[in-house]
Image: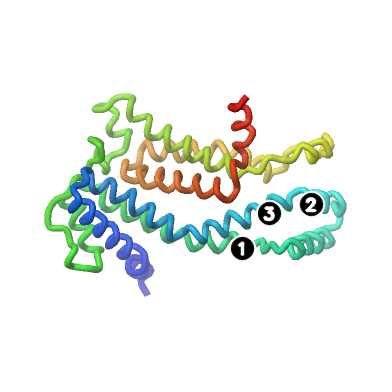
Amino acid sequence: MNVGFIFDSIVLKPLATILVAIYHALSFLGVPYSLGFSIIVLTIVIRLFLYPLITSQLKSSKKMQMLTPHLSRVKERHKGDAKRLQQETMRLYKEHGINPLAGCLPVLVQMPVIFGLYNLLQRIVSNGASQSIAEANKLVFVKDIELTSPWDLSFFGLPLGKGPSQLLPDFGIVVFLIPIATGLLQFVMSKMLVNPKPIEEKMRQSKEDKKEDFATAFQTQSLYIFPAMIGFFSYTFPIGLSLYWNTFTIFGIIQQYKILGWGGLQKWKEKIKR
């Protein structure tokens, strides 16, 4: 069975149908730059659809963070006994009602939807208007809403199908605001996920304990590397994709704040208040 056909049928075509329906609605209301705003509205719809799954994932992450000091003590106590360490770790998970795999399912469900939206936007904004419409009409389920006239592939004067790197000669350094904003938003969302260690835990740590293990070092480095990578990609990718990504990230920040609070940004918030 063709995997691409299945993916198109259950992910890509529904997304395309919803996008075109939103576009028709916004066009009817006279909203300018209807395609750009349709991408934003579709991204919000996707985010609301995934809201319960992402909430479950964030709550599981919060429980795991709260358990970190206990896991550290268990690790110290049974440093040389791998079997006992595993037993005590599983006992802690059971006592606190944590399933270490609970956070994986939401991610697995999210990925096809996110990848599908990314794939769809590449197909409809990376080509000329006529080819873009042809691609969209191939995917819509409902023939009555097929596009019959060209749609505007720009958003506030910026072509959705081109990246900042292509627009630099025409628009100058102002186009750098797009990758910078994309990277900063991604950094904020990533930083909020970092759980600041309680003061008492820091005081309890010995000098040897303060040495970062591989996992901690990777987390610290990825906090800066991943947003930088996303910012670089947004410099080369079409603006339509950055529009989707930034909308998705902003709503992610709001959702994380509602569930986890400021997280790793709490210290910065306190410093600003002073």
Residue 253: horizontal and vertical position, in percent? Answer: 50, 45
Residue 247 picture quarter: top left
- Secondary structure, mark 2, is helix
Left or right? Give the position of 270 relative to 233: right
Residue 93: horizontal and vertical position, in percent? Answer: 74, 61
The residue singled out by tag 3 in the image is 64
- Kindly identify the amino acid type of the residue bearing the numbered disc 2: His
- Which label is found at residue 102? 1
Q: Earlier in the sequence, mark 2 or mark 3?
A: 3
- Kindly identify the amino acid type of the residue bearing the numbered disc 1: Ala
- Kindly identify the amino acid type of the residue bearing the numbered disc 3: Met
> In the image, what residue occupies the spot 61% across and 63% down?
102
> In the image, what residue occupies the spot 63% across and 63% down?
101
The residue singled out by tag 2 in the image is 70
At label 1, counting other C-alpha atoms closer than 10 Å, the crowd grade (few under 14, some 14-19, many 20 or more) is some
Q: Nearer the viewer, residue 250 or 160?
A: 250
Residue located farthest toward the bottom when viewing the structure as drawn: 1
> In the image, what residue occupies the spot 27% across and 62% down?
17
Residue 46 picture quarter: bottom left
